[in-house]
């Protein structure tokens, strides 16, 4: 498409940026190339190296952004074509990861209109009497998700999630990095821009203040007293889910492709009437990853990429997205 004007590019990026990214770090930038192709550019200094040492979650986040761009194009009747993946440094801060052309003519994508509605739901879930039909819809739509709806299994997984998360939180570097991406008061200069703010974390003022101390200066004394784990536990929320979703993709898959499917699976969860939040600690922790693989009977050819808790939010969701301005994302 020759008509990718600067104004249209801004509109597209405004929608593509609504894709999820690990810790909301937003590592994706966009550049219009001279030949009319669009490049997905990695902001190489935007990282969470402790939580994501292999950089896999950053690549999954880029993949989600790529799918976000595809969905934004779809809403306007366009599609991505001729993707070439290449790693081409532009500067110490920017590296092109892939580029693609844009063609006219695309069947409407059912997921495109869910983009503005999707958000990470970190509040409680309401009890729901009958989720069976919605879960069946989700499983029918995606062959890369396994839904666990059994209450006892969910209670077990809620406990595992707390143990997995706490084993990471015990690391000084992990806590420091997490706190650096948290914006616990609206006065933080990046509150509306990136990272995890109080609203996104569904915390009130007291909870946010407590989190600052429990993850910060009071962590060690509280841990010595055996109190830190229970203060940070999220198990009640996980236990209130309608289902735990295991997101599995082929071993060795290109992480950009994995990321595209990660986003689509999440939108499909929303389409089925649920809200969701990933629990990466469960897939990142080898022991709990293994337990979930066994529980879900995941074959050796598949990787358990991530885990979601999904359910009906306890109150109506007013989606809010905290994102960098479009101008910063076009380079
Ligand atoms: C690869 C990946 C892993 C994530 N892991 C977690 C997680 O473990 N816990 C969590 O609360 N959110 C997790 N998220 C969700 C992001 O924090 C979230 O997408 C981001 O803050 C943007 O907010 P939004 O989803 O509401 O648009 C993850 C997202 C991605 C892409």
Image (cartoon, rainbow, N blue to C red):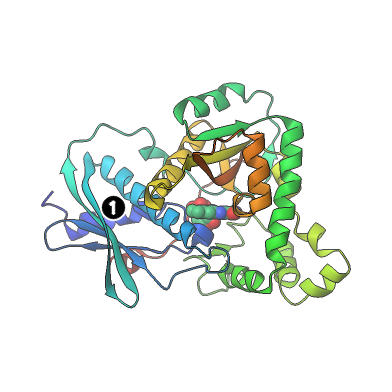
Q: Residue at x 10, y 52 (%)?
A: 2
Q: Is residue 106 above or below residue 284?
A: above
Counting from the top left corner in percent of width and height, residue 21 is at 47, 57
Q: Quadrant of the C terminus?
A: bottom left
Counting from the top left corner in percent of width and height, residue 274 is at 56, 35
Counting from the top left corner in percent of width and height, residue 61 is at 43, 55
Q: Residue at x 27, y 40 (%)?
A: 74
Number of labels in the image equals 1
Counting from the top left corner in percent of width and height, residue 309 is at 62, 42
Element type at mark 1: helix
Q: Tell me which corner region of the image, top left, top right, bottom left or bottom right, holds residue 107.
A: top left
Q: Residues within 10 Å of mark 1 (few under 14, many from 20)?
A: many
Q: Is residue 40 above or below residue 277?
A: below
Q: Residue at x 62, y 57 (%)?
A: 201
Point out the residue furthest to the right here: 225
Q: Is residue 156 above or below residue 272?
A: below
State the residue position of label 1: 12
Query: Is any part of residue 331 visible from this angle?
Result: no
Classify residue 309 as left or right of residue 36: right
Query: Is any part of residue 37 visible from this angle?
Result: yes
Q: Tell me which corner region of the image, top left, top right, bottom left or bottom right, holds residue 314.
A: top right
């Amino acid at each position: 498409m020759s008509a990718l004007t600067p104004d249209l590019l801004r509109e597209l990026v405004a929608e593509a940026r609504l894709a999820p990214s690990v810790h909301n770090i937003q590592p994706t930038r966009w550049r219009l190339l001279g030949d009319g192709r669009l490049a997905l550019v990695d902001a190489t200094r935007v990282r969470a190296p402790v939580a994501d040492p292999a950089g896999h979650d950053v690549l999954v986040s880029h993949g989600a952004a790529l799918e976000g761009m595809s969905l934004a194009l779809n809403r306007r009747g366009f599609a991505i074509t001729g993707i070439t993946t290449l790693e081409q440094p532009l500067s110490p801060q920017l590296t092109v990861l892939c580029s693609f052309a844009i063609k006219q003519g695309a069947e409407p994508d059912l997921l495109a209109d869910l983009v503005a509605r999707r958000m990470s739901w970190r509040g409680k879930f309401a009890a729901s009497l009958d989720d069976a039909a919605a879960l069946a819809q989700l499983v029918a739509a995606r062959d890369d998700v396994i839904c666990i709806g059994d209450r006892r299994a969910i209670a077990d997984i809620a406990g595992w999630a707390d143990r997995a998360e706490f084993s990471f939180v015990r690391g000084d570097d992990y806590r420091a990095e997490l706190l650096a991406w948290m914006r616990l008061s609206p006065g933080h200069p990046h509150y509306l821009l990136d990272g995890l703010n109080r609203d996104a974390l569904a915390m009130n003022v007291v909870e946010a203040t407590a989190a600052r101390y429990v993850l910060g200066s009071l962590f060690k004394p509280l841990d010595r007293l055996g109190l830190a784990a229970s203060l940070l536990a999220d198990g009640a929320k996980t236990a209130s889910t309608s289902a735990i979703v295991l997101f599995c993709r082929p071993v060795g898959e290109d992480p950009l492709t994995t990321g595209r499917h990660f986003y689509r699976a999440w939108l499909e969860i929303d389409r089925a009437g649920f809200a969701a939040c990933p629990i990466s600690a469960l897939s990142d922790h080898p022991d709990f990853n293994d337990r979930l693989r066994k529980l879900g009977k995941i074959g050796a050819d598949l990787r358990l990429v991530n885990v979601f808790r999904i359910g009906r939010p306890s109150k109506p969701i007013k989606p809010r997205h905290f994102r960098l301005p479009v101008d910063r994302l076009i380079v």
